[in-house]
Structures are given as structure tokens and as C-alpha cells.
Amino acid sequence: MTRTEVVKTLSLLKAAFPHSYKDATSQDLELMVQLWERQFRDNSFEDVSAAVDALISSRTTGYSPTIGEIKEQMHRLHHRDDLDELAAWALVSKACRNGLYGYREEFAKLPPDVQAAVGAPEQLRAWAMMDTEAVESVVASNFQRNYRTTKARQKELDKLPADVRKMVSGIADHFMIGGD
């Protein structure tokens, strides 16, 4: 978002939630504009506006939404079609049925977020060799918990500005490969 777009959005919020801004000084407003520029620099005006409009139309508290609430709303608007853990498990369960010999191909067919929760193609093969009852109870439960955690972690990363996301990713990579 550009500075002009930030000012436009904050003006809209000020009109919708006057109580939140009634004691704000010009210095407070300038700091708010700078903060919003930094927090939404990687987002389009259209995305932020859609989230703000949705919150304005549904908010009952009388107070302006926080940056975090706006980012959460943006995430909801962009990820309406995400699989829940049961639907994700159904895909994995189906992949396990051909997982003895076609585990690599089956893994490749899975959506990226499901692949992340499975871990590796070899995991599908290991599950395919297990007793079906154990897979459909214990493994299913563990996968679903892991999928929820993976999705929650990705959701939080998606909300971060790109440079912060890159820094976090670099730190994670450093620890995963046993960096110096």
C-alpha cells in the first residue's frame, strides 16, 4: 500500500469508528500512518480495503480493528477454500492406498500444505505398510493434529511483512541444517 492509500484507509476507519480516534494528536496519526505503511507495505490496497470493509460491516464493539485483526480478516478472505484436517486426512488416506509402490506419485498429487504435514513421500509408504485400523485411528489423529499446527504456523507467517518472513525463514533454515 502507498502512503496515500494508507491515509485513505485510516480516514475511513476514523469515520466508521470516531471514538477510537477522538483523542489522537497529529503526531499520533502520523505515527499510525508510518506503522500502517510498514505493516501493509506488501499488501495491495484492494486486499486491505476488502478486509477493512468486512470488519466495518460486522464489527459491533464501536472500536477500530487492530492491524492484527485486519490481517486475520485478509487471511480469511484469501483462504476460504482451505481444507480442514478431515478433508486433508481423506486425501492422505486415499494416497496411502497406493502408497506401497506409488508413494512418490501420490505424495506429488497432494496439496503443498498437506505435503508439509505428511513430511515426506517415504512417510506415505510407511503408513501404507501399517495395519489399516492403526492408520485410520492413531495415524489419522496424529496427522490431523500436525496438519492443524502446520496450518496455524503458516497462517502466522503469512501475516508477517515479506522481509520479516524472509528473516524468520532464514533463522529456521539455519537451525534445520545445523548451521554454525
Image (cartoon, grey):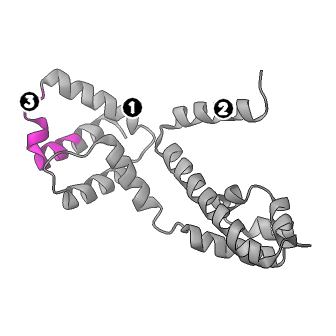
Main SS, magenta region, reads: helix
Query: Going 36% across and 55% down the picture, which residue do you hit?
Result: 73
Instruction: Judge left or right: residue 129 versus residue 35.
Output: right
Magenta segment, which residues?
Answer: 10-24
Reading the chain from its start, which is encountered first: label 3 or label 1? 3
Q: Label 1: few (<14), some or many (≥20) within 10 Å?
A: some
| Residue lying furthest right | 101
Residue 96 versus residue 15 in the image, above or below: below
Q: How many marks?
A: 3
Query: Going 82% across and 75% down the picture, which residue do you hit?
Result: 131
Q: Are marks 1 and 2 in contact (CB under 8 Å)?
A: no
Query: Going 88% across and 71% down the picture, which residue do you hit?
Result: 129
* Residue on which the image places disc 3: 23
Q: CA distance from mark 3 to mark 1?
A: 23 Å
* Residue on which the image places disc 2: 170
* Residue on which the image places disc 1: 38
Q: Quadrant of residue 91?
A: bottom right
Q: Label 2: few (<14), some or many (≥20) within 10 Å?
A: few
Residue 14, image x and y in percent? Answer: 14, 42
- Judged by depth in the image, the label closer to the viewer, 3 or 1, is 3
Callout 2 amino acid: Gly
Q: Quadrant of residue 172?
A: top right
